[in-house]
Image (tube, coloured by chain):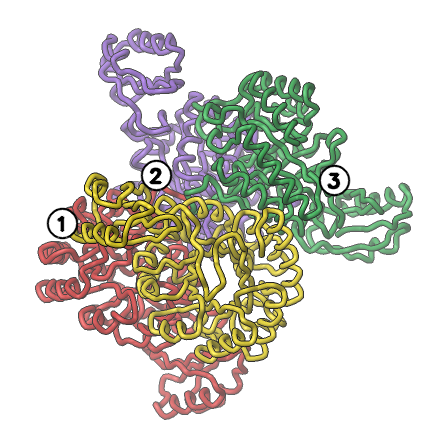
Chain colours: A yellow, B green, C purple, D red
Amino acid sequence: MLVVMKPQATPAQIAAVEEKIRSLGLSPHAIPGAQRVAIGITGNKGALDPAMFEGLPGVADAIRVSQPWKLVSREVKEEDTVIDVGGVPLGGPAIRVMAGPCSVESREQILETARAVKESGATFLRGGAYKPRTSPYEFQGLGEEGLKLLALAREQTGLKVVTEVMDVEDLPLVSEYADVLQIGARNMQNFSLLRRVGKSEKPILLKRGPSATIREFLMAAEYLLSQGNYRVALCERGIRTFETMTRNTLDLNAVPVLKALTHLPVVVDPSHGIGLRRHVPAMARAAVAAGADGLIVEVHPVPEKALSDGQQSLTPGEFAELMTQVRVIAGAIGRPV
Amino acid sequence: MLVVMKPQATPAQIAAVEEKIRSLGLSPHAIPGAQRVAIGITGNKGALDPAMFEGLPGVADAIRVSQPWKLVSREVKEEDTVIDVGGVPLGGPAIRVMAGPCSVESREQILETARAVKESGATFLRGGAYKPRTSPYEFQGLGEEGLKLLALAREQTGLKVVTEVMDVEDLPLVSEYADVLQIGARNMQNFSLLRRVGKSEKPILLKRGPSATIREFLMAAEYLLSQGNYRVALCERGIRTFETMTRNTLDLNAVPVLKALTHLPVVVDPSHGIGLRRHVPAMARAAVAAGADGLIVEVHPVPEKALSDGQQSLTPGEFAELMTQVRVIAGAIGRPV
Amino acid sequence: MLVVMKPQATPAQIAAVEEKIRSLGLSPHAIPGAQRVAIGITGNKGALDPAMFEGLPGVADAIRVSQPWKLVSREVKEEDTVIDVGGVPLGGPAIRVMAGPCSVESREQILETARAVKESGATFLRGGAYKPRTSPYEFQGLGEEGLKLLALAREQTGLKVVTEVMDVEDLPLVSEYADVLQIGARNMQNFSLLRRVGKSEKPILLKRGPSATIREFLMAAEYLLSQGNYRVALCERGIRTFETMTRNTLDLNAVPVLKALTHLPVVVDPSHGIGLRRHVPAMARAAVAAGADGLIVEVHPVPEKALSDGQQSLTPGEFAELMTQVRVIAGAIGRPV
Amino acid sequence: MLVVMKPQATPAQIAAVEEKIRSLGLSPHAIPGAQRVAIGITGNKGALDPAMFEGLPGVADAIRVSQPWKLVSREVKEEDTVIDVGGVPLGGPAIRVMAGPCSVESREQILETARAVKESGATFLRGGAYKPRTSPYEFQGLGEEGLKLLALAREQTGLKVVTEVMDVEDLPLVSEYADVLQIGARNMQNFSLLRRVGKSEKPILLKRGPSATIREFLMAAEYLLSQGNYRVALCERGIRTFETMTRNTLDLNAVPVLKALTHLPVVVDPSHGIGLRRHVPAMARAAVAAGADGLIVEVHPVPEKALSDGQQSLTPGEFAELMTQVRVIAGAIGRPV
């Protein structure tokens, strides 16, 4: 159930509706919109009667929400969510590009990469300090040292930092350094982590699990919003299929489907998606043409020496060329980069 | 093994190389290129010794082919194949759009659709006269009557006709009417059909099976070329994954991967690929941005009354709008439509 | 709709019901049962009114069929179908084992294998004379010569012959030699072939396509029955998943699901299913425990020299050991082998 | 690299080998076996030279390990691991059955279920106190109250308790009550959790992720063993495929494959695996026939009133019948239940 307030509804009227919802043993979630406030209701088992709310002062309408996801739904919030990341909007007309190495490996590596991607037009720096690796014997990231290097790179370039938080214990530390907290694909249904990060104030980049349905992806985002954090961007990064020639199968179908179902920004990761360096630009172009609001791309000064994901990382020169191509496609559909 | 002839090699020299190959119990496949002829060799169990061919008159080089597919490989023929469909090139810089209903249903339906898609810029008319249907109790197509209506539509509009041939028995009849023979996704590994259509002189549109790997797709095309028909275009039309929100998962990753591995044109079918009318244009745009050489799109005058695939068919008006969008993306990357 | 006749209904009463059905523009399918005849009706678009049939002489009941498959459904025929293959029942309490090489390769190979599997307790000999191969350059089978060798092996051992028919053109020839016509996994939705084989009088072994849903599998069988051939056994042979350590993923879940939905016998192919010789016996045991009515197993005198599928073929000795294990499991659940 | 000590090697000799390994900057993992100790080495980038260890006192052999997984490998430990769960062996000849509700819901529910499954022959009680749910609005488990009820049921029945730990924070609390810590399918690659639980002293039941390959599954177990906890059982519980008629696709192929690759016990969950109550017994029988060392089965006094997974839970009566069937199959292959 969604209670839509009139544009001129007063804070007191909004508070009264919230109080009414609580009195029924349910939870109100006020969702601020450009024109008006809407209040999502969760916690009910069956359908609620709209009449309980329609008569209250300031209420324009009470609408049944037909999907299992509520707060992430376009039914509940029609206009696109724009996340303010320290002054840089993520979502909205401009397409944002996040770039950087898979893992932070050294001071030189991250600073050199940051400068290069900044120059080519990226506005966010990606880089892992804590790395989820299939094998316990592989490089697991530099940890706090990596976070510090990311902060240094931010200082020098002005790029916003996106980095992964792997567990609840690291959350305070990672939050100190990150501008955007990434939740990795393998943790998409780590509900304990979702609940905790949902209580944080940081913007979140939630990656789709490699075999998560779109429904499960939206429900994972719903966990975050249900805890009060509405600053969530979704990231398609390739699904697992029978095909073995590509690392994953980047599912661009998810882009228009997600844009129709949710108001949250949709970012695409062509690097993990196809997993083959030479084909990353084609998938980046296609993602923009399909309607993505952002890209996240792996760039490494010397990919063949990368400690992880070298086979899918672009060189700074290849990334500059990719940005040119992305600008052409974005320009064609009237979106700045 | 591929024997590359010198640009100035004479027909007699080519014939001598072919004779040498036959004398070893193997099969020669002369592949005419823009600059020179190459001769593929098949039938060998192990690797051949290049020295057996390198000394022959007119031979420039003898190259080992590293992939299980030979004649479809870019190793064997570097330049893009351009198929001449009665004067209309398929492949090459221009992007071709094929459009029309899933099934031919009536004279009015096919003529009205043909005129509309022609006006919007399509150059090929698609439409099934023989329909492979999951259930024996569903509409199976008009058969020869459908073929005649397609021919009539061609007469009135000048569009080239693409239509499916389901079996060897119908091949002579379908060949009489079609400009391009479509091999459907479910028949991609119907090797008896592939062998027979490979002996035909008609251009072929080979659709990828819903769970065929890219390797299997190329091997299916290899069946066609190995029988002598080099006028083959490949069509990505969506693969089967765990996702249920879309009908199939259009695998745009296959586009750059195929373009790198083979010289054959690559067409994309966004209609079957995503299976949801409102999202077909986004996937069509993305396909062009990813490097597709053509699109095949379902259009029906009244989709909700279509005897098959109505939920993924565009109206003529929606198709006109899609063409506008496709032209914008194609223009941005310097390709005419 | 299914019209169930009374046990004592006369042929004339049955004919009258069929006539009534035809007069409505629909098709009757008389399904003989142990106790009584039922008449399936196909061709209707919407639901039919049972009252149209319930009053007719000899009619016990008119039942709506809730599934898209009709004639294969347990709703339409409750008791298990037992196929009489020249005196050997396939289906029913006894578990039948079919064994033999992937391809017929030579007189010695097929005769030696046939004698060995007969001795270990197989009742059917499998072996391909026409082989669907991913590559046009691989061994495609001995053709008619292979069929003749199978017939010779039958003569010498009394085993019934199961062999694949790949296309409509080969149907008359293959039918001359085979006791059971196999439709291969890649041809499961070759509807032209299904329609033709459905008109044949031979028993059929229909293999599940590697990415066919259970629903599609049943619909493919429905094609066969709708043409009049009710002597169809279904064969689960492994589906395509993301797992790469096994050749396919043998889907034993399909066994109880199919047994519940259809009256047709269910055979399991553990050889293609898991694709690894050492694990074939475990999957064969599991298939029997899950309720399979038969097994089809690849056996070759010298697997490492097999022209196809050697890595999943058992030696005659391994097959004898497998039969011992299968007998133990079958005995535990009260089924003879 | 695995250093195998002689049967009569002394503790001092073992310590000396461990010291030698540490001096090379690598990690030793002593693996006690029935006859002798073996010491796994991890942390090396390339291959090590066996000669470095073969001369040391007490060393029988130094063997290269060919797989990416080390400590879980049969190459490293040939005999089956038997986990002592408070006096009850898990692994080894006897097949163990774990049974109980998906979620602990109430005192009556869990006590009634525990008594019933005990009586039918289960030795472990399953039941979730912390439930990972796709939606934030679904029942999330009773938490500590649920753990207390499980302990009460153990007290009354003597059953060992298996229950899920969802995150590092709950680990101390859950460890207080559980006999076996379950790591859920969605957390199979929650590496932070794996590392922490790997440091615990409790036996672990690690469930396979719904789209984890067997390789990834073994690597996840390797995380646990690499932290010192060798008391790990693996649980196959169904993978995600294209099939929609069953909830998951129980992958019994994994049973023989895992048994060949690892010494750890393999448990099968037919309830989640097929997800349909009426078909759980068939899959349980098949799992035992395929070689599983245990089963974990959902049982609820009134499945249709269950707060989660009711459609796949057996009634106590159905479970008793399943146990009869399982005993028959187990008996046939010479294994007690």
Going 18% across and 44% down the picture, which residue do you hit? D304
Question: Can you identify the residue that label 2 sits on?
Answer: C293
Question: Can you identify the residue that label 3 sits on?
Answer: B82
Inspect the image, locate mark 1, and give the three-letter code of the amino acid beneath it. Answer: Pro
Tell me: residue B126, above or below residue C95.
above
Position of residue D121 in the picture relative to residue C332 (left or right): left
Q: Are marks 1 and 3 on the same chain?
A: no
Is there CB contact under 8 Å for labels 2 and 1? no
- Cα separation, mark 1 vs mark 3, equals 68 Å
Is there CB contact under 8 Å for labels 1 and 3? no
- Cα separation, mark 2 vs mark 1, equals 33 Å
Tell me where residue D295 appears, x and y as whole percent.
Answer: 26, 57
Q: Nearer the viewer, residue B140 or A302?
A: A302
Tell me where residue B95 appears, x and y as whole percent.
Answer: 68, 40
- Kindly report which numbered mark, 2 or 1, lies closer to the viewer in this rendering: 1
Inspect the image, locate mark 2, and give the three-letter code of the amino acid beneath it. Answer: Asp
Q: Does dot 3 land on a helix, a strand or a loop?
A: loop
Going 52% across and 78% down the picture, which residue do you hit? A152
- Cα separation, mark 3 vs mark 2, equals 53 Å
User: Which chain's residue wears label 2?
Assistant: C
Question: Can you identify the residue that label 1 sits on?
Answer: D301
